[in-house]
Amino acid sequence: MKIFNTLSRRKEEFVPIEEGRVRMYVCGPTVYNLIHIGNARPMIVFDTFRRYLEHKGYKVDYVSNFTDVDDKIIAKAIEEGVTSEEISKRYIEECKKDMEGMNVRPATVHPLATQEIDGMIAMIRKLIDEGYAYNVNGTVYFRTRKFKEYGKLSWKNLDDLRSGFREIKVTGEEQKEDPLDFVLWKPKKEGEPAWDSPWSDGRPGWHIECSVMAKHYLGDTIDIHAGGEDLVFPHHENEIAQSECANGVPFANYWMHNAFLTIDKVKMSKSLGNFFTVRDIAEKYDLQVLRLFMLSAHYRSPLNFSADLMESSKSALERIRNAAERLGDLMKSAKDTEPSEEEKAMAAEAEAFVRKFDEKMDDDCNTADALSVVFELVKYANQHVNEECAAATVKVFADTLAQLCDILGIITEKKEEILDAEIEQLIEERQAARKAKNFARADEIRDELAAKGILLKDTREGVKWTRA
């Protein structure tokens, strides 16, 4: 299996540190709002890669954090007049709902930055002791000049980077020894959450959080570190610098980065009105459509989101589900007879599809080509598997389709149809539960309907519902 390593900018044979085990860290979202479809791409891509590694027989320790202390979270908390913790807890739960809708499996561990403060303080203290960091009036900075390999991930030259900073004057940054030095710890401002430290009551910088969480749950050197390409610099570059200086060993052997997502070939932006949350998409589509859409391009290729492409993905998902349903129906009536020689040859073809699928995924997680193999399998099964086939033959194709779709995280079962009268009855029950302040039951009903493809929207005129 080969992985394109951002560090070397070439495909490399994947060799784990420990045979049969993979330690993988994926940067998670900052939880100050509902996640958007840009957040969804790395979630879906690296969840799929994890599934494939497990299919290959690896035990995968998969860690993906939630950044639950950040300027945006604090701003949102001030805006709503609540605590930062209340904001982060709310949106972690909402994020988990969206992940479930996209069939993104929970990580082995979802660490929270605020629960790892002691580890961050310990790493910062070590960096200061080793001369890699310095304290100025309660703010601790990392000395980029001291780490000779700074820039090796982003392939940026330190001198070029510094020249770009010569004309930049940032208020409060004059105390740095070098413009490229970055913050490890900063003193609190009025109204911000803070923790005790040897330097000031304050909070950690963003970069140190991931270094410490990766070290805590996966060790000093990990197999794979992944995330969006927007994180290569400065976030991942800074993670490498502080981790390797503190731990004295390479931080990650392989770096994987997914490319950007655009909307109708334009960068997604709230100001342009082309900003979509996963929840927005769920109002129009089964989130399995979004997952299939995300996997229809290679993860390192830019991906353009459009209504036409989503409709195409919706049709593609329907083809897979129709084939799975047809095979299921054939299983119910198939005879338990000995497969013919022709059927044995067909079963061998099914095995060949699995090998071809693995070849595509072994080539740097090429989900686009792997998905094409699934459609080849669907076409073959539709043409060759029929009422005359033995139950064993039908089962081979049903199981093969289920196996490949499961690796891609595609759910082949069709959602149970629900009648309008049942929906209205459940909405009434939900309204009664809310009136009685039984919010747990109200949320339960909303989730129950969502699982069946019914999306609720509370409006001034009452509750509106739509089918996904």
Image: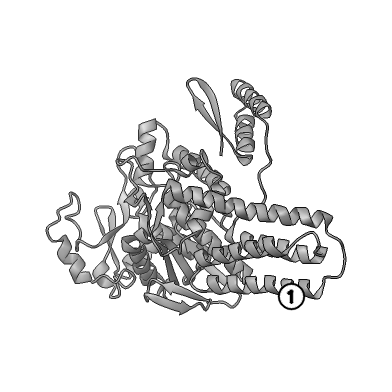
Q: Is residue 402 above or below residue 56?
A: above
Q: Looking at this view, is 314 or 301 the one in front? A: 314
Q: Residue at x 34, y 70 (%)?
A: 153
Q: Is residue 60 visible?
A: no
Q: Which residue is mark 1?
A: 345
Q: Residue at x 26, y 70 (%)?
A: 156
Provide residue 298's location: percent of width, then percent of height: 45, 64
Query: How many C-alpha atoms fall within 10 Å of the one at disc 1: few (<14), some, or many (≥20)?
Result: few
Q: Looking at this view, is 241 or 402 the one in front? A: 402
Q: Residue at x 53, y 68 (%)?
A: 23
Q: Quadrant of residue 127?
A: bottom left
Provide residue 289's location: percent of width, then percent of height: 54, 49
Identify the amino acid type marked 1. Ala
Does residue 148 appear to the left or right of 279 in the view shown? left
Q: Residue at x 44, y 39 (%)?
A: 87
Provide residue 131's location: percent of width, then percent of height: 29, 69
Q: Looking at this view, is 163 or 125 the one in front? A: 163
Provide residue 388's location: percent of width, then percent of height: 81, 62
Q: Is residue 281 above or below residue 2?
A: above
